[in-house]
Image (cartoon, rainbow, N blue to C red):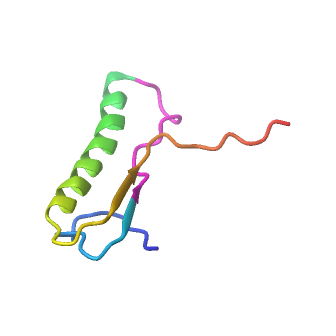
Amino acid sequence: MTLWKGLAEREHLNEIDAIINLAGEPIADKRWTSQQKERLCQSRWAITQKLVDLIHASATPPSVLISGSATGYYGDSG
C-alpha cells in the first residue's frame, strides 16, 4: 500500500491493482456557505476526475477504483 499526497507527478496508473480515494475537504469544521459547498464539491470532484483520466491514460489500469467522501467514525455511545 502506498499513500499519495497528490497526483501532480502522475501520468498514468500502470501496474497498480486498486485505488482507494478518500480525498476531500472536511465537512464538519466550517459553516455551509455557498462558497464552502463549492469547495466541498470541488475537493471531491476534481481529484476523482483526475484519477479517472489517469486510469484512461493507463495501458494496464487498476482493476478497481473505490471512492468515498464524508466518511467518519462517531464512536461507540454504549
Find residue 74 and report its horizontal and vertical position in percent. Answer: 68, 39
Q: Foreground residue, 1 or 33?
A: 1
Asked if residue 42 lies left or right of residue 70, the reply is left
Above or below, 51 against 9 in this view is above
Asked if residue 35 lies left or right of residue 49, the reply is right
Residue sitting at 36 percent across and 70 percent down? 17
Q: Quadrant of residue 8?
A: bottom left
User: What stretch of residues is rendered in magenta?
Assistant: 20-32
Find residue 57 and report its horizontal and vertical position in percent. Answer: 13, 64
Find residue 25 and report its horizontal and vertical position in percent. Answer: 41, 43
Above or below, 6 against 46 in this view is below
Residue 29 shown in magenta: yes
Q: Foreground residue, 24 or 2?
A: 2
Most prominent secondary structure in the magenta stretch?
loop
Residue 33 shown in magenta: no
Asked if residue 72 lies left or right of residue 25, the reply is right
Find residue 59 and report its horizontal and vertical position in percent. Answer: 16, 71
Residue sitting at 48 percent across and 32 percent down? 30
Above or below, 64 against 41 in this view is below
Residue farthest to the front, as pictured = 63
Q: Foreground residue, 46 or 55?
A: 55
Q: Quadrant location of the C terminus?
A: top right
Q: Quadrant of residue 2?
A: bottom left
Residue sitting at 23 percent across and 74 percent down? 14
Residue sitting at 46 percent across and 26 percent down? 31
